[in-house]
């Protein structure tokens, strides 16, 4: 059994979430968000200020006849949208490189992250609207363990796991056979290292195998699990683990996910991902969409 706390602590160059992000995540459950606190974080970050103004002046907010300065942009976006935008930009810094351990380039791993976040938010809007932002953030960081394993093992990770795969062995099982842990467990350890709420870490740890009932069951985990599957079905962020994950039966039933609803979720997700990439200054014109 791997001591995950020590495992994470022993890595010299961990993916680092900006210090302000844990504070921002803690604000998610505060129904009286203090706009001035969020605004202050934006003002002291030039890159983030530009993103906020670009987004507030984009077609997504119906801006065509005038331009908004930073103060007006902050007010125009509102606390909820602003909070999400800050986290999108900060987490994009964590995913600034590729991930050889899972054969993912920079764009693929970032797009997989944001796609799952958007899908989680969309599902939450239908089933637990009060938790939309929490679902979004958890979807955003669900695969961050892949970056830790990349830092430690690089391309050797993909090779060692592939040697353990068989017709009766899942990718996660192969990870555990090869290294004594898997990317979901490592991701949860990193979330705790960052100081994120334990509910997020729990969802990250179980997002490939959500607990169906009883102690440990959490709708947040169910939604992030479904969002991960939807992202993969869309062709987003597919690495060496490919399409080896299945939608849990209890999640399919509880979220009423049919092929038709999944196709709608995929289309909605792609539309939002494009807007986010545009706001963050990424070129999304060259992506190819795969049918579900």
Image (cartoon, grey):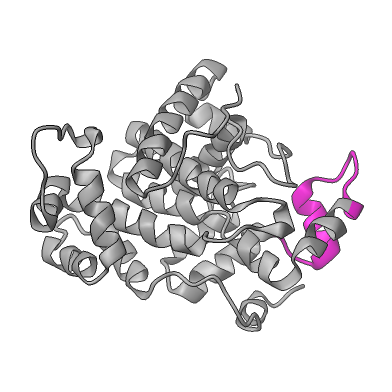
Q: Residue at x 54, y 27 (%)?
A: 253
Q: Image height check: is 253 above or below 135?
A: above
Q: Which residues are magenta?
A: 163-182
Q: Residue at x 53, y 34 (%)?
A: 286
* Nearest the eye: 119 or 58: 58
In the image, residue 154 lies at what x, y percent? Answer: 74, 65
Q: Quadrant of residue 40?
A: bottom left
Q: Residue at x 40, y 53 (%)?
A: 137
Confirm whether the magenta stretch covers residue 1: no
Confirm whether the magenta stretch covers residue 180: yes
Q: Quadrant of residue 237?
A: top right
Q: Classify the position of the N terminus by image quarter.
A: bottom right
* Residue 83 appears in the rendering: no
Q: Image height check: is 196 above or below 100?
A: below
* Nearest the eye: 29 or 21: 21
* Nearest the eye: 271 or 120: 271
Q: Residue at x 27, y 69 (%)?
A: 45
In the image, residue 163 lies at what x, y percent? Answer: 91, 54
> From the viewer's perspective, is 260 left or right of 237?
left
In the image, residue 174 lies at what x, y percent? Answer: 82, 54
Q: Classify the position of the C terminus by image quarter.
A: top right
* Residue 285 appears in the rendering: yes
> From the viewer's perspective, is 180 left or right of 199?
right
In the image, residue 46 lies at what x, y percent? Answer: 26, 66
> From the viewer's perspective, is 20 left or right of 193?
left
Q: Image height check: is 174 above or below 58?
A: below
* Nearest the eye: 103 or 216: 103
């Amino acid at each position: 059994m791997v001591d995950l706390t020590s495992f994470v602590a022993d890595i010299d160059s961990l993916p680092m979430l900006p210090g302000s992000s844990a504070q921002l995540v803690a604000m998610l459950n505060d129904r009286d968000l203090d706009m001035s606190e969020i605004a202050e974080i934006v003002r002291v970050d030039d890159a983030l200020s530009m993103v906020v103004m670009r987004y507030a002046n984009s077609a997504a907010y119906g801006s065509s006849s005038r331009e908004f300065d930073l103060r007006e942009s902050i007010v125009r976006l509102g606390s909820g949208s602003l909070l999400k935008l800050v986290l999108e930009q900060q987490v994009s810094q964590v995913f600034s490189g590729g991930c050889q351990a899972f054969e993912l380039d920079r764009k693929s791993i970032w797009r997989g992250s944001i796609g799952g976040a958007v899908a989680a938010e969309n599902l939450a809007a239908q089933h637990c609207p009060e938790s939309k932002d929490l679902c979004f953030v958890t979807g955003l960081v669900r695969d961050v363990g892949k970056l830790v394993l990349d830092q430690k093992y690089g391309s050797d990770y993909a090779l060692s796991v592939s040697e353990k795969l068989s017709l009766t062995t899942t990718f996660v099982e192969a990870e555990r056979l090869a290294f004594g842990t898997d990317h979901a467990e490592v991701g949860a350890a990193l979330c705790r290292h960052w100081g994120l709420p334990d509910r997020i870490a729990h969802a990250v740890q179980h997002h490939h195998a959500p607990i169906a009932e009883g102690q440990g069951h959490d709708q947040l985990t169910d939604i992030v699990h479904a969002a991960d599957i939807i992202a993969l079905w869309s062709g987003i962020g597919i690495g060496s683990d490919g399409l080896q994950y299945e939608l849990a039966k209890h999640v399919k039933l509880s979220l009423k996910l049919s092929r038709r609803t999944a196709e709608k979720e995929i289309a909605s997700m792609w539309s939002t991902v494009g807007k986010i990439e545009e706001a963050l200054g990424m070129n999304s014109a060259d992506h190819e969409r795969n049918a579900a």
